[in-house]
Image: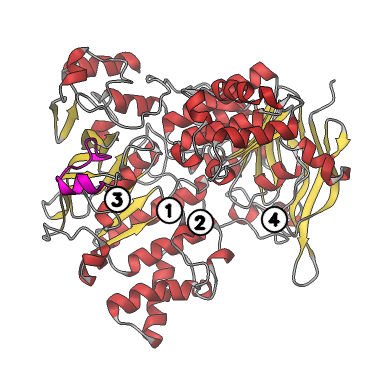
Amino acid sequence: MATPIIDIRNLSVGFTGRAGLTLPVLRNVDLTVHRGESIGIVGESGSGKSTLALASMGFLKQGLRVIGGRVRFNGEDIFARSRQELESIRGGQLGLIPQNSGQSLTPTMRIGAQMAEALELHCSLPKSGFRARIIELLGQVRLPDPEVIYNRYPHELSGGQQQRVAIAMALAGEPDALLLDEPTTGLDVTTQAHILELLRDLARERNMAMVYVSHDLGVIARVCEKVMVMYAGEAVLQGPTAAVLRDPAHPYARALLASIPRLCDSHLPIALDGRPPPPGGAGDGCAFAPRCALAREACRAARPDLLEAGQGSQARCFFHEEAHALAAGGTGADPLHHRPDGTPALALDGVSISYAAPGFLDRLFGRGDDVPTVDGITLKITSGETLGLVGESGSGKSTILKAVAGLLPPAGGRIGVGEDTGLPATVEQRRPEQLRRIQMIFQNPDDSLNPRHTVAEILAQPLRLYDRLSGQALFDRSVEILETVRLGAHYLDRLPGQLSGGEKQRVAIARAFAAEPELVLCDEITSALDVSVQAAMLELLNDFKKLKDTTYVFVSHDLAVVRALSDRVAVLYQGRLCEIGPTEKVYGSPSHPYTSVLLNAVLEPDPDKAPALMAEDVVELSPPAQGCPFQRRCKRRLGAICDTEAPPWRDAGEGHVIRCHIPLDDLDTGAAEQS
């Protein structure tokens, strides 16, 4: 057999703790990747996924060291290489696509200049040929107008375009292997589906090996032939993708699948109880035993080896035959659905928002932005209701939340909360009671939690401001709030940097609810979380809805998450509403052609279920000045009427309305044909 590209044997990586003990982060891991193979590594945060992937390119985070085992790349020990040799390999024979492409691109350099640096380091091409090669690479990753992209700065590109640039840079050195660390996290469903198709095609064309780290099992099902499931720093299940995802032979893998919301199921996913052990805390037995439904005394006494479990897979479980009888998804509790009583919670009346700053002459003559970013948004949400806002990146979802929160003043229209029909445009203009009624939870808790403040100080801010609490009363209320989000009093003295991603998001939720708000704005709050933590967050939000009758506006790219939590859904394209209605109606039929595109692009954790893309892979910088906003990408376009006339709202009954020139009967027929 040919020499593997990556050959990891019995690798253990760890660090020295305060007591002088060596604490393992990876324990005796084996991984073999051949040319042309695609292998996915999955597991909860802290399971060792990224540590393993980075170790395969000879990189360890500060404080970590190799305790035992070896890593070979193309037959040679990578940790025996000099720093100069490693630099020549990384970015050349071994490419890396990071999770956040925006942070890996230099904001002050044009795309062409950044890619030229990669070519200079890893290619023998003369500088005179750099421009042509860069444009060729940008074309390979299907970026529109490569010559235009060449001269742009990163901030002038969408998230999907930035990720394609990162892929092009990784391909510049014509790598033998490509490491991908959550490269599609945070991307909308259509952009993600197109990028995954691109990666599959490139791997086949170049016969590249791919190691794909992700918590999204739908992504892994789409791009990987084999899967390794990690828990507490060791492989607990590995084998062909179909065997691992369809009928996994390990209780932990089945619990992960149960944590995934499904597009075809309106139940909340099942949250996995407990948490993984800290480094060095697994003991002598099975690391998963404290959380396992099959655990027995034998599991606590000895650590199981990887055992043959059928269908080409190996499981680290004494009782893997019994694992097949455990539930594997889609059987969680029903969410609390709201019965409208007419009490107003939030009203948007003709709201338009623009990021364009008018010049002096525009202000003098009263001219505004001809094509605002968000336009004509009219929505009414009743008390206790959850409205899901969905659409691709750039559709205006977060922009609307920022306007409601007072972080971005609208250019026109009115925003009302409760009986207050004319809410001031900015935070500075709002009274304390108005501020209290609306709280926002951001996608990345690191952006909203002060890294120098303890959890106690973070929670004290709203409690002092709104409730005038101090002393023992402040402490008691802080503990009560933490326990509500399933954290304890011992977290009060911790800094954000001492918390996991899920714990930080719980603190952000606790701070929002400390103000006892009537309306909570959730902006992609589960997108960066692993599936088990995500399920716990959805359960937590549902609990608050039961306890407080909280009203939510929930923004997410994950349409299955939106279905699990929302009473109604509003679909946005280019800042314009296309469809509004009860969740079951919007996810059913008929639906707007754009809604169908979004639903058909959703990935399921099944390698046989491919997304059915129905729109061109094009990023539009602004909506057309007239006609239907979706006209340029719609596969069901009727002709000139779509280009020149604004589409009418069509009433599909039960509060379900669709803005489209296509008659409802034809929309219904088209949706049935596409499914």
- Residue that label 2 marks: 502
Give the Cα separation between the discs numbered 4 and 2: 31 Å
Name the residue nearer the viewer: 634 or 456: 634
- Residue that label 3 marks: 401
- At a point 52% along the width and 28% down the height, the residue shown is 195
Instruction: Give the magenta range.
Output: 358-374
- Residue that label 4 marks: 297
Q: Of the residues shown, which amino acid type is indicated by label 1?
A: Met
Callout in the foreground (3, 1)? 3
Give the Cα separation between the discs numbered 3 and 2: 22 Å
Q: Earlier in the sequence, mark 1 or mark 4?
A: 4
Question: Are the two marked residues, 4 and 3, in contact with CB atoms closer than 8 angstroms?
Answer: no
Q: Is residue 420 magenta?
A: no
Name the residue nearer the viewer: 541 or 333: 541
Q: Quadrant of residue 394?
A: top left
Question: Are the two marked residues, 4 and 2, in contact with CB atoms closer than 8 angstroms?
Answer: no
Q: Of the residues shown, which amino acid type is indicated by label 2?
A: Gly
Report the colour scheme: secondary structure
Q: Secondary structure at mark 3?
A: helix
Q: Earlier in the sequence, mark 4 or mark 3?
A: 4
Give the Cα separation between the discs numbered 3 and 1: 20 Å
From the viewer's perspective, tell me whether residue 434 is left or right of residue 465: left
Query: Looking at the rendering, in which quadrant would you find the C terminus?
Result: top left
- At a point 60% along the width and 41% down the height, the residue shown is 98
